[in-house]
Amino acid sequence: MKSIEELKAIKARMQSEINIRGANGDADTRIVVGMATCGIAAGARPVLNAFLEEIQSKRIKGVRVTQAGCLGMCKLEPMVEVFVPGKEKVTYVKITPEKVKKIVADHIVNGKIVSEYVITENAQ
Amino acid sequence: MRELSLNILDIAENSIAARASVIDISLILRGVFLEVSVKDNGCGMSGEFLARVTDPFTTTRTTRKVGVGIPFFKMAAEMTGGTFEIRSKKGEGTVVSAVFDIESVDFIPIGDIGGTMGALIMHAPNTVFTLKIDVRGNVYEFDTMEIKDVLGDDVPIDGIEVINFIKNNIKENFDAVNGGIIP
């Protein structure tokens, strides 16, 4: 099967990466996507997948993408929380795969929060 | 939900929440009837909870008093003239299954089953997931144990590259056995 060969190649790449970076998971930037019924219905799965694809295609290291349940404001889903070590949590609301590209490029890569997608006090 | 795959994701998230160690998902098409089932060995439900689980005002969530995941799935099946069933036993697990008429105008397209599996595996990397697709006898089977056998102990299954691989691999294989039959 051709796909097994592909998986073996990924394995080899990841093994060499693990050797270089070590297991420093705590120092990673963490992206959390809300994945309860409300998030899923609003489009959280394509948002999650867009993060995975952007991070891989731009070869960004030191980022973890995880999932959470309901982040508490269903009508603002899909919601995404970004935790950069040493910085305050940033909560983005009503995210789409298109907006993910900007968040990855501006916030994850360059450290510049995309303020127009950030939750504001009157959004609730 | 705009895709049946999103309903499947939502239902299987309940299995993860029930701390299942094995979750089996199957899509079996016989004639025009598609049976979708999600089976887990999680904590299960009491008879009392099971009896009211299709009621939207029953939920395990703590942020709201409404739970629409199972009612959505049931409605999606019944809209096509299909059926819905849930069986569960406390301490043993739960099986949620629904039958859809794929020729009904109200059939929700299957969507990205690869994306659903990728999201689930990423969320619960230690859980064994199996997927069986059977489209009128054309069968594709996926099992996270097979992936883990290739990866070995030191490369995690929930790495971004591995998840993207799984997602695309399932999608390709699904498209190959489906041949456009299930919309």
Image: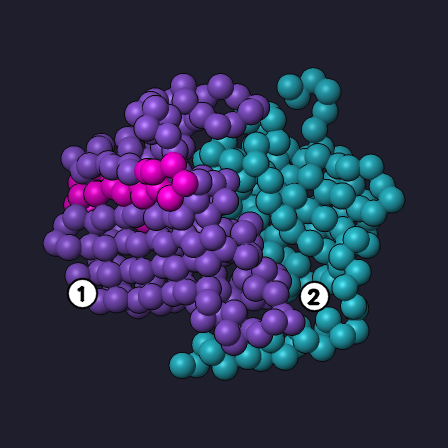
Is A82 on the left or on the right of B164, as rendered? right
Let me know if residue B100 is in the magenta part. yes
Q: Nearer the viewer, residue B175 or B91?
A: B91
Q: Residue furthest front?
A: B91
Q: Is residue B76 visible?
A: no
**The quadrant where residue B163 appears:** bottom right
Q: CA distance from mark 2 to mark 1?
A: 40 Å
Let me know if residue A26 is in the magenta part. no
- Specify the label residue B137 is tagged with: 1
Label 1, secondary structure: give it.
Answer: loop
Q: Amino acid at mark 1?
A: Gly
**The quadrant where residue B108 appears:** top left
**Chain corresponding to purple in the figure:** B
Q: Residue furthest right?
A: A86
Q: Residue at x 65, y 51 (%)?
A: A65
Colour scheme in the image? by chain
Q: Position of residue A52 (x, y in %)?
A: 60, 56
Q: Position of residue A75 (x, y in %)?
A: 55, 25
Question: In what quadrant of the picture does the N terminus of chain B appear?
Answer: top left
Q: Is residue B143 visible?
A: yes
- Specify the label residue A59 is tagged with: 2
Q: Amino acid at mark 2?
A: Arg
**Chain corresponding to cyan in the figure:** A
Q: Which residues are magenta?
A: B88-110
